[in-house]
Amino acid sequence: MPLVQLTYASTVAEAVTVEDIKTIVAQASQKNESVNLTGFLCANLKFFMQCLEGERESVNRLYLKIAQDPRHDKVSLIKYNEIDKRVFGDWSMGVVTQVDSHKDLIKQYNHCESFDPYNIQSSDCIAFLHELSHIRKGGAR
Ligand SMILES: Cc1cc2nc3c(=O)[nH]c(=O)nc-3n(C[C@H](O)[C@H](O)[C@H](O)COP(=O)(O)O)c2cc1C
């Protein structure tokens, strides 16, 4: 079964808080581990961008489920491709909940002041999340 990587952008639903996002990720990590999915999510209180990696069937099934989740809307696919090796293999679901605090990275990849995944180049989205995952490993939020 081919290994794929899927990245999408979405808009956070109004009532959702940083605590809610942490809860989403805590539950997601457990579920992902059980189906061998890995990935990384970043958010501010406006937008999400998430990368999912795993077997094609598992990634597609989860994406369809996530797209129906009322905690966000305007779900928009940024990038979908087969991969030989996972980029986020160490993360059942890594997260940076307050991505706007990483101003330099946002300027570099997003060319603006605050994170907006609908404007990120599809060719840049993995590098952006990968850099965040390194920062996260160093302990920053
Ligand atoms: C932004 C966002 C990201 C999510 N990421 C995951 C994920 O990586 N894995 C997962 O199992 N559920 C994730 N969910 C939750 C799913 O949408 C869904 O609620 C969950 O899989 C439970 O589905 P079930 O009720 O069919 O068990 C995410 C939800 C949101 C809003």
Image (cartoon, helix red, strand yellow):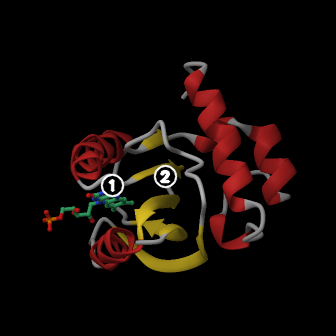
Q: Nearer the viewer, residue 89 or 11?
A: 89
Outermost residue toward the front?
1
Q: Nearer the viewer, residue 63 or 73?
A: 63
Q: From the viewer's perspective, is residue 93 above or below residue 102?
A: below
Which is nearer the N-term, disc 1 or disc 2? 1
Q: From the viewer's perspective, is residue 21 above or below residue 52?
A: above
Residue type at mark 2? Leu
Label drawn at residue 16: 1
Pointer 1 with pointer 2, Cβ within 8 A = yes
Q: Nearer the viewer, residue 46 or 94?
A: 94
Q: Who's the residue at 37% across and 43% down the image?
A: 92
If the image is split into quadrants, where does the C terminus sit? top right
Q: Quadrant of ligand 1?
A: bottom left
Outermost residue toward the top?
139
Residue type at mark 1? Val
Q: Residues within 10 Å of mark 1 (few under 14, many from 20)?
A: some
Label 2, on which residue? 45
